[in-house]
Image (cartoon, rainbow, N blue to C red):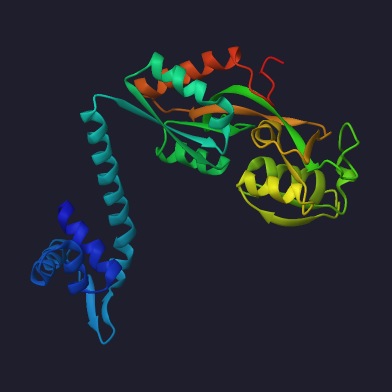
Amino acid sequence: MDRKQLEYFITVYDLRSMQAAADKLYVSRQGVSKMINQLEKELGHRLFLRTPKGLEPTDYAITLHPHVKQIMEEYAYISGMNSLAAQSKSAVTVYGLDHVLAALSPDFLDAFSKAHPDIIPSIVESTDEGALEGLSSGRCDLAIVTGPLDFSRFRGKKLFFAPYCVRLPKDHRLAEKEEITSPDLAGETFVGKGRSYACFRHNFDRYLLNPGIPVRILAETSDESVITALVARHLAISIGYSYTACLYPHPDVVERPLHDDKRGEYIYAAAGRDATLSSAASRFLDFLLAWRPSHQLPGTIPPSA
């Protein structure tokens, strides 16, 4: 079988019609039918059955579909590598927490580009879980994630310590406190990044839900501008990292430290424990680890502190 056969199979499967597939592929209906017949002969199984409602995939085709789709995605990735190679540049793919790149600032990318003009950093914002899954599946070279890190699966270096903070309206009843404790938050309405993010999930589980402190969650969103607006309008308060709060200041919103046993989490630059990094990925990681100590990021504490 070849790539064209798989492409025709995916198209017919998705559209449930030889003619619709032919129109999308800009070929004749007979050409699509011939390609599907050839694939069926090679595999030794029928792929589609004609019904009054149109074509229906067989059980074999349903089982085959996700595997073919994965192969086509790999083809697309390899094509992307070829286009990058044509530019005489290497790419390093980094999955990072929302707003970590903004915290590092454009200065970081500018400095890296000047130091390594032959490397293109491709940085994708993600959740902690999404970034680590990306490492495990090989979809990314590096990840910037919240600790603690599972060192049985990953290796990593601390970038900075991210303190927790509570964001609330400046005239809120808790705004006069220097630090806010978990019992202070009883009865409050919250908005935050959501349970896909370790910071949000751990804070709510450890300090509110498990101890039985009654709270209400208005919504979960990763859009910090929406979180800021809801807090400013007295519709909710938020728990998050100080460095994120620093990126979205508002005259009617204040930040107060969350007083607890941990006070925050380390943010790590991570790779797969047994993964062999490309030259581009190794140089990116080395540059990041060397650049970070000499640049103080608002709302963070250096690892040595």
Q: Residue furthest front?
A: 251
Q: Position of residue 232 (x, y in %)?
A: 75, 47
Query: Which residue is at a point 65% across and 35% down the rendered structure image?
Result: 244
The front one of 55 and 119 is 119
Reply above or below: 276 against 220: above
The front one of 108 and 199 is 108
Q: Which image quarter is the C terminus in?
A: top right
Q: Is residue 205 left or right of residue 148?
A: right
Q: Position of residue 257 (x, y in %)?
A: 80, 32
Q: Is residue 298 left or right of residue 286?
A: right
The front one of 225 and 146 is 225
Reply above or below: 303 against 69: above
Occupied quadrant, residue 64: bottom left
Q: Which image quarter is the N terminus in?
A: bottom left
Q: Is residue 261 left or right of residue 3?
A: right
Query: Which residue is at a point 60% across and 14% down the rendered structure image?
Result: 293
Q: Is residue 210 left or right of residue 240?
A: right
Q: Position of residue 200 (x, y in %)?
A: 69, 44
Query: Which residue is at a point 79% across and 37% down the rendered structure image?
Result: 254
Q: Position of residue 162 (x, y in %)?
A: 68, 29
The front one of 228 and 88 is 228
Occupied quadrant, residue 28: bottom left
